[in-house]
Image (tube, rainbow, N blue to C red):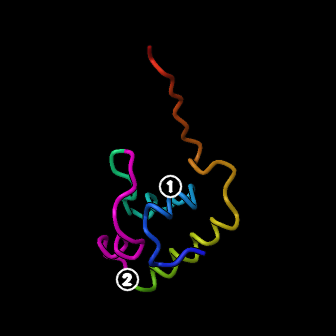
């Protein structure tokens, strides 16, 4: 279960679809390919969100956890290959 006290690192690991959701809300959760430090609540408050907004995020993220989208990246896939 997601709470406002979950670390961004755990959130990204537990709910891959959370990255797109958070970015859509204007909350940066990845920097240089790594999750940012802090909790969901701290990241939301940095962007000026209040208690009601944070509770909505928790509800929405729990819904994502229970019902993950088919493509958590939102259709944005990057193919990589090793260069020798």
Percent of width and height locating residue 69: 67, 55
Percent of width and height locating residue 6: 47, 72
Q: Residues within 10 Å of mark 1 (few under 14, many from 20)?
A: some
Label 1: element kind? helix
Residue on which disc 2 sits: 50
Which residue is nearer to you in this view: 15 or 51? 15
Residue on which disc 1 sits: 20
**Magenta span covers which residues?**
33-49
Quarter residue 52 falls in: bottom left
Circles 1, 2 touching at the beta carbon (< 8 Å)? no
Kindly identify which numbered label has been placed on residue 71.
none
Q: Is residue 45 above or below residue 17?
A: below
Q: Is residue 34 magenta?
A: yes
Q: Is residue 58 left or right of residue 83?
A: right
Q: Is residue 56 above or below residue 13?
A: below
Q: Is residue 52 above or below residue 43?
A: below
Quarter residue 76 falls in: top right
Question: The N terminus is located in which quarter?
Answer: bottom right
């Amino acid at each position: 279960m997601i709470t406002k006290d979950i670390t961004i690192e755990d959130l990204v690991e537990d709910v891959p679809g959370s990255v797109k959701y958070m970015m859509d809300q204007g909350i940066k959760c990845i920097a240089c390919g790594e999750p940012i430090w802090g909790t969901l609540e701290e990241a939301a408050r940095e962007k000026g969100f209040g208690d009601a907004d944070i509770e909505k995020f928790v509800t929405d993220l729990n819904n994502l956890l229970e019902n993950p989208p088919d493509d958590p990246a939102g259709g944005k896939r990057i193919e990589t290959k090793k260069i020798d």
